[in-house]
Amino acid sequence: MEEPIGTLTPLSDTDQMIADPEQDVRGRAVIDCNGEKVGTVADLLVDTAENHVRFLRVAHGGILGIGAVSSFIPVDAVRRVTDDEVLIDSAKDRIAGAPPYDPDLVDQNDYYEKIYGHYGYPPYWAPGYMYPPFPGIR
């Protein structure tokens, strides 16, 4: 399998921004395929070479943010975005069972492959990959 083209970086660590600030999904509730709230979009993981968002970093669990954990969800799982919510095609249990967020692994390709495999999507560097409709960054 081919290697990723660019480096993935949290949007909050770059000087980039969403092209249309009204389409910035950070802070919006993430709703699973059963209509249950999973958590909140804490950040976006951006492919700096292609200026595409590749993953949502979703904070979930805990009480009032204390004890919350984070997981990455591929943007491929996003089915709809409203003014307040990001609706995804996976169930809350699947997200809870995803490879845990580890900032030390954020630059390791096999970590991303595990995440894509967990959700059943090909990685963005796979031949024939088509970027899903998602707000662009600049």
Image (cartoon, helix red, strand yellow):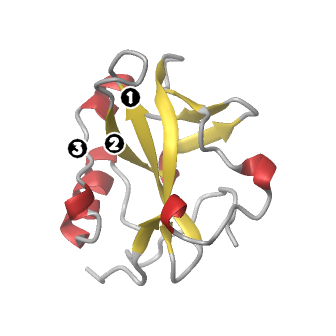
Identify the secondary structure beneath mark 1: strand
Q: Earlier in the sequence, mark 1 or mark 2?
A: 1
Q: Residue at x 33, y 28 (%)?
A: 68
In primary-sequence order, the first of circles 3 and 1 is 1
Q: Considering only vertical position in the picture, is 18 above or below 69?
A: below
Residue type, numbered disc 2: Ser
Between 90 and 18, the one lying in front of the other is 18
**Residue located beneath label 1 in the image:** 60
From what the image shows, is residue 18 above or below residue 97? below
Between marks 3 and 1, how big is the CA–CA gap?
A: 11 Å
Which badge, 3 or 2, is on the more N-terminal residue? 2
Q: Amino acid at mark 1?
A: His
Query: Which of the two residues, 47 or 129, is positioned nearer the viewer here?
Result: 47
- The picture places residue 21, in percent across and down from the top left corner, at 77, 53
Q: Is residue 111 above or below residue 14?
A: above
Residue under numbered circle 2 = 71
Secondary structure of residue under mark 2: strand
Question: In which quadrant will I find the N terminus?
Answer: bottom left
Q: CA distance from mark 3 to mark 2?
A: 6 Å
In the image, what residue occupies the spot 40% across and 24% down? 65
Mark 1: give few (<14), some (14-19) or many (20+) Cα within 10 Å: many
Q: Residues within 10 Å of mark 2 (few under 14, many from 20)?
A: many
Q: Is there a contact, CB below 8 Å, between mark 3 and mark 1? A: no
- Residue at left 23%, top 52%? 102
Q: Secondary structure at mark 3?
A: loop
Q: Residue at x 59, y 75 (%)?
A: 51
Q: Quadrant of the C terminus?
A: bottom right
